[in-house]
Image: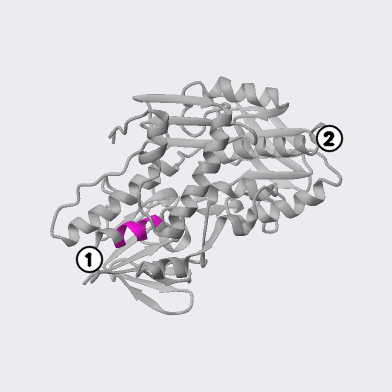
Amino acid sequence: MAHIVIMGAGIGGMPAAYELRELLPKEHQITVVSAVSYFQFVPSNPWVAVGWRQREDIVLEVGPLLAKKGIAFIPQAVTAIDAPGNTLSLADGQSLAYDYLVITTGPKLSFDEVPGAGPHGGHTHSVCSVDHAQAFWRDYEQFLQNPGPIVVGAMPMASCFGPAYEFAFIVDADLRKRKLRHKVPMTYVTSEPYIGHLGLGGVGDSKSMLESELRNHDIKWICNAKTTKVEAGKLFTTEVDGLGNVYKEHEVPFKLAMMLPAFKGVDAVAAVPELCNPRGFVIIDEFQRSKKYRNIFSAGVCVAIPPVEATPVPTGAPKTGYMIETMVSAIAHNIADELAGKEATAKGTWNAICLADMGDTGAAFVALPQIPPRNVNWFKKGKWVHLAKIAFEKYFLSKMKSGNSEPVYEKYVLKALGIVRLTDR
């Protein structure tokens, strides 16, 4: 009998647990370990931040859901990993032995890389967690009584730019509905070299389309922005040119700010010798397996993927839902094959698919593969994307409640977009 331990109960960890349980004989034990007791549907956090969703709409207690599938759950943070000894140390002092470890922790939010940033003692908000989204909503309710400038964007070394664009347009849409938009100057500040770069070197016509949308919504922008510090009501950022030389210094005033932080690997994972790159992301082979420890697999935002290209201000490559889905499925099949005495053969994909809500419309992009040159390079806008994002939220939460492990993107999204899966790693 083997014991498979999954670190993290998010968009990677929960499907991994369900799919492993489906594939493995019952004698093999599966345990999920998470620092929190709940699953949160992270893509809906921008809606929570403006009051369009409540916490209970997008949060599920995972213990009972996993128990129905015969999967153990321990709501404790992992404080250390003894990779040679195949053991985890947990915050409550207990040790947990494993035969296989699946790391799906998501990132550490590295607010401390910019002085004054972050919701914990800093001056900016985040929508990276439901707690952070709720914190924005509390301040936003007060802000609506006496509006002022808003800053939205992404810090240097950020790697997930879609939610920043989403949030700018969602706030714009909410303020228009409240007849307050005329009182709120908005500035989008990003480390991307140009609008629509998205950490992907652009996708289709994303540059001109998103620039047009920002203009049409009267949102000003600063690109190649190296944000250096934040003070109460003021964001300091250095705009550089294409060679990284200082072009202009900006002091951007705000009454409310949401800046996505840089990501790093969580401390317990980053501390394991030879497991991670310098940023703490897990170095994996084509089978989602650690190159150092063959019984450790990893998927999602916590894996090491090189930037698509060098940019004047450092940016990372995003790990979108489709990519995470295929990584998780590859891990489940590879562990099942190894336990059956077969070689690992399943591979994830570095394709990027994203449905980005814009409040009352939306934008969809498909980059197959994520790193250019591409077989598919597609970007479209329309009301249908907004509706598709709502449908996707409802379907994914239903899938988590039922313990369903079927793929979402490949079965539904790609089919709806008329795109056939391409293997490209």
Q: Nearer the viewer, residue 305 or 101?
A: 101
Q: Nearer the viewer, residue 280 or 48?
A: 48
Q: Secondary structure at mark 2?
A: helix
Mark whose residue sits in front, 2 or 1:
1
In the rendered image of this protein, does residue 151 appear above or below residue 266?
above
Q: Is residue 16 one of those drawn in magenta?
A: yes
Q: In the drawing, does residue 217 fall left or right of residue 204?
A: right
Q: Is residue 376 among what the camera can see?
A: yes
In the rendered image of this protein, does residue 411 appear above or below residue 182?
below
Around disc 1, counting alpha carbons within 10 Å, would you say few (fewer than 14), some (14 to 19), or many (20 or more)?
few
Q: Position of residue 169 (x, y in %)?
A: 66, 35
Q: How is the image coloured?
A: one colour
| Magenta span | 15-21
Q: Which residue is mark 1?
A: 25
Q: Position of residue 333 (x, y in %)?
A: 25, 53
Q: Position of residue 243 (x, y in %)?
A: 53, 25
The residue sitting at 49% across, 43% down in the picture is: 392
What is the distance, in whole Å, between disc 2 and disc 1 at their CAs? 61 Å
The circle on residue 225 is none
Q: Is residue 386 one of those drawn in magenta?
A: no
Q: Residue 211 occupies which quadrant of the picture?
A: top right
Q: Nearer the viewer, residue 371 or 49?
A: 49
Q: Nearer the viewer, residue 389 or 295?
A: 389
Q: What residue type is disc 1 on?
A: Pro
Q: Which residue is mark 2?
A: 183
Q: Residue 8 occupies which quadrant of the picture?
A: bottom left
Q: What residue type is disc 2 on?
A: Lys
Q: In the drawing, does residue 23 fall left or right of residue 281?
A: left
The residue sitting at 49% across, 53% down in the picture is: 397
Of the two numbered discs 2 and 1 on the same chain, state the one appearing first in sequence: 1
